[in-house]
Amino acid sequence: MRCPYCQNEDSKVLDTTHDSRGVVRRRRECLACRQRFTTIERPLLAIPLIIKKDGTREEFDREKLMRGIRISCAKRPVSAAAIDRLVGEIETSLQRMGRSEVSSRVVGDMVVTGLKELDHIAYIRYGIVYLGLDDLRAIRNEIDRLLRDEETPNVNKR
C-alpha cells in the first residue's frame, strides 16, 4: 500500500477491523514518514447496470449515490458513518439480487426506505425530487403521513 503522504510503498498494519458487509478497515503506519492512515477493502462483486428513466444504462456509482444522500442529510444530525452504512446496505442488496440490470427506481426506493428510517427531514428532502412532490399539498400530505405513522403504536411491540 502506497503512503498517501510520501508515496512510500512500505507500511505496517496497526489494526484491522471487519464489519458485517465484508468491509475490512486497516489502520496503517508508513515506515518512512511515520504518518498514519486508514485503508478500506471491500469485495468487488458484480454490481448490476442501472437502467435510467430514459432507458439509458450506466454503471452503479457508489460515490454518486453517497453525494445524493449527503445532500439530503445536509445540516441534519446524521453521521457520516450512518450514511456510509446506508450506501453499503444498498450496494450489498444490489449485489445479492444477482441481476445484470436493475431499474433506477429500485435504487431510489431503497434510498427512500433507508432515509425514512434514518431521518424524516432528509427523507422529505430526497422525496421532493425522487417522489415528485411538486407542490406544497403533496409535501404536506407526505409529512402528515409520517406524523400519523409516528403516532400509530406498533402492534408488534410489547
Image (spheres, rainbow, N blue to C red):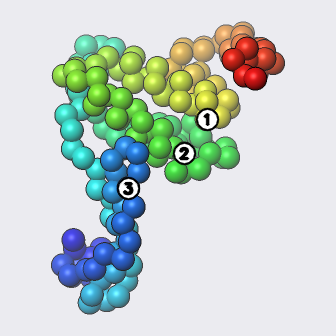
Q: Secondary structure at mark 2?
A: helix
Instruction: Say if mark 1 contacts mark 2, CB within 8 Å.
Output: yes
Q: Residue at x 53, y 24 (%)?
A: 112
Q: List x then y, in percent, for residue 12.
A: 28, 80
Give me the disc on residue 118: 1
Residue that numbered label 3 is attached to: 18
- Position of residue 68 relative to residue 128, above or below, is below
Q: Neighbour class for label 3 at 10 Å: few (<14), some, many (≥20)?
A: few
Q: Whole-Å distance between the Cαs marked 2 and 3?
A: 16 Å
* Amino acid beneath label 1: Leu
Image quadrant in which you'd find residue 120? top right
Residue that numbered label 2 is attached to: 82
- Position of residue 113 relative to residue 30, above or below, is above
Q: Residue at x 23, y 24 (%)?
A: 98
Q: Nearer the viewer, residue 81 or 156?
A: 156
Whether residue 147 is visible: no
Q: List x then y, in percent, for residue 37.
A: 37, 73
Q: Residue at x 51, y 43 (%)?
A: 83
Which quarter shows the C terminus?
Answer: top right
Q: Secondary structure at mark 1?
A: helix
Left or right of 102: which side holds 134? right
